[in-house]
Image (spheres, rainbow, N blue to C red):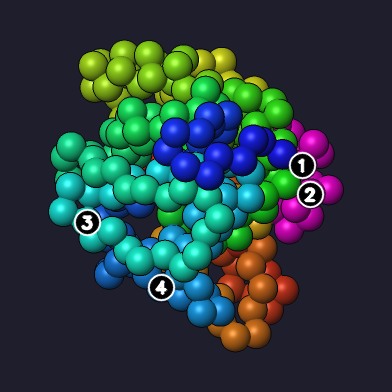
């Protein structure tokens, strides 16, 4: 596992960034405070990252509320986007400026079933992102070299780009095939995110990955989705 940093002055090897500044337009209200089994979407994402990183930075909008999170055994702090709903690339730039580790793991705050073992594999293969069972490269979660990502993001934003996929292409990210991470996450839950109220599981539902979807779950009792570009 990465080195464990207990405070601001201790060395950090791996940082986590949770993108949480989206508008939740399709959900209709702040989805990140929605609970699953008593734990909010945001808390679930932070807790998963805390299993593989030394610090977590949660990026919120300029007027967003810094949610109270349950106990996490890693330093967690908030950073604010310079503009409201500027898109995930702006949020990534904000997080990169605040983190301290040379490697960063990036995930969405609406990804409640991240598997720490898969995140750890991304760190080992940095820069890297996951390929779903249908062969599609998903932009989140991903692991990046912080210095290279900062340069790439600044160049892309200056050119008007807003897509996370553009960063992966610019830094030459590895694409981890499904076969490489399936054993760690047989259901592909690491790629599942929540976009609409109907994506939340019912009491008898189990999430699964639906190939080619943009962050949606199948609504079956044995049934999940992958992150799109809009957080």
Are dots 4 and 1 in contact, CB under 8 Å?
A: no
Label annotation for residue 34: 4
Q: Which residues are drawn in magenta?
A: 175-188
Which of discs 2 and 3 lies nearer the camera? The answer is 3
Chain-order first, disc 1 or disc 3: 3
Say which residue appears at 16% left-offset and 40% top-offset: 83
Looking at the image, is 193 positioned above or below residue 220? above
Q: Which of marks 3 and 4 is in front?
A: 3
Q: How far apart are marks 1 and 3 (CA)?
A: 34 Å
Residue at the spot 63% in from the left edge and 50% down from the top edge:
51
Q: Please tell me in which quadrant of the rendered image residue 120 appears.
A: top right
Where is mark 2, residue-wise? 184
Mark 2 vs mark 3, CA separation in Å: 34 Å
Q: Name the residue under label 3.
A: 64
Crowd rating for badge 3 (residues with CA inside 10 Å; few <14, some 14–19, many 20+): some
The correct choice, above or below, for 219 with respect to 59 in the image is below
Q: Residues within 10 Å of mark 4 (few under 14, many from 20)?
A: some
Q: Indicate which disc, 2 or 3, sits on the residue closer to the N terminus.
A: 3
Disc nearer the start of the sequence (3/4): 4
- Left or right: 17 with respect to 4? left
Q: In which quarter of the image is the N terminus?
A: top right
């Amino acid at each position: 596992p990465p080195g464990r940093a207990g405070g601001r002055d201790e060395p950090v090897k791996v940082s986590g960034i949770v993108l949480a500044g989206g508008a939740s337009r399709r959900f209709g209200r702040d989805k990140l405070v929605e609970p699953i089994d008593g734990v909010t979407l945001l808390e679930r994402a932070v807790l998963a990252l805390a299993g593989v990183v030394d610090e977590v930075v949660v990026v919120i909008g300029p007027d967003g509320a810094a949610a109270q999170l349950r106990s996490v055994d890693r330093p967690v702090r908030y950073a604010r986007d310079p503009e409201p709903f500027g898109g995930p690339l702006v949020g990534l730039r904000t997080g990169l400026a605040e983190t301290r580790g040379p490697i960063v793991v990036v995930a969405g705050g609406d990804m409640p079933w991240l598997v720490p073992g898969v995140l750890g594999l991304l760190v080992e293969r940095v820069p890297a992102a996951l390929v779903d069972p249908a062969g599609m490269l998903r932009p989140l979660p991903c692991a990046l070299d912080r210095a290279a990502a900062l340069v790439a993001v600044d160049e892309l934003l200056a050119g008007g780009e807003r897509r996370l996929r553009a960063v992966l292409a610019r830094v030459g990210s590895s694409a981890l095939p499904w076969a490489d991470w399936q054993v760690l996450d047989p259901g592909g839950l690491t790629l599942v995110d929540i976009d609409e109220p109907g994506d939340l599981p019912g009491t008898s539902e189990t999430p699964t990955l639906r190939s080619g979807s943009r962050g949606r779950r199948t609504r079956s009792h044995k049934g999940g989705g992958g992150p799109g570009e809009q957080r």
